[in-house]
């Protein structure tokens, strides 16, 4: 009888431990893409702080944006395929418009970069809006 009671306590203790682990996993933690989203938003905001750094500063910031965008796409593409695809394509377009940009770009080249940067901002905002309920 004591052996049976001992096994019952062991089983109850194991069940309690499993329940604690299961409940810990069911907490209100945010998805991984929320941190990636915040990093990307900060990188995009960095575009407005480039005064005086010229084309090299812009290219450096785009490298950071591209890295952060890749992280967002990798962590969220399963849940937000349309939005992450828009981020990828807009960042690629911006990077392409910067490739080979001379130190004294023409007005048309600046206009292209500006348009592509606005597309990145728009794509990131759309993703942020779509993920706001999961990341707030």
Image (spheres, grey):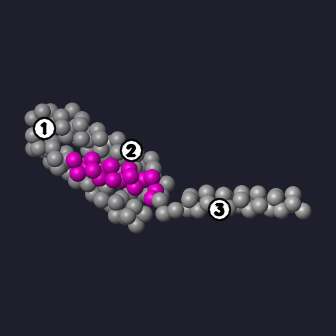
Q: Name the residue at 41% across, 49% down.
A: 73
Q: Name the residue at 13% across, 38% down.
A: 53
- The quarter of the rendered structure image containing the N terminus is bottom right
Pointer 3 or 2: first along the chain: 3
Label 2 CA crowd tier, 10 Å (few <14, some 14–19, many 20+): some
Residue occupied by mark 3: 19
Between 15 and 44, the residue placed more toward the observer is: 15
From this viewpoint, is residue 92 visible? no
Q: Name the residue at 40% across, 55% down.
A: 34
Q: Is residue 82 left or right of residue 11?
A: left
From this viewpoint, is residue 30 visible? yes
Pointer 1 or 3: first along the chain: 3
63 vs 79: above or below: above
Quarter where residue 121 is shown? bottom left
Q: Determine the CA span between mark 1 and mark 3.
A: 57 Å
Q: Secondary structure at mark 3?
A: helix
Q: Secondary structure at mark 1?
A: helix
Pointer 2 or 1: first along the chain: 1
The magenta span reads 30-46
Residue occupied by mark 1: 54
Residue occupied by mark 2: 70
Majority secondary structure of the magenta segment?
helix
């Amino acid at each position: 009888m004591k052996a049976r009671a001992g096994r019952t306590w062991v089983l109850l203790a194991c069940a309690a431990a499993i329940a604690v682990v299961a409940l810990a996993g069911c907490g209100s933690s945010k998805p991984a893409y929320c941190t990636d989203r915040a990093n990307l938003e900060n990188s995009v905001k960095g575009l407005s702080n480039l005064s005086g750094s010229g084309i090299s500063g812009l290219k450096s910031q785009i490298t950071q944006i591209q890295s952060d965008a890749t992280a967002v796409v990798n962590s969220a593409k399963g849940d937000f395929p349309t939005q992450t695809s828009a981020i990828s394509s807009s960042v690629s377009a911006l990077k392409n418009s910067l490739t080979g940009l001379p130190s004294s770009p023409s007005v048309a080249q600046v206009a292209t970069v500006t348009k592509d940067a606005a597309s990145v901002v728009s794509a990131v905002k759309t993703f942020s809006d779509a993920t706001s309920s999961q990341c707030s």
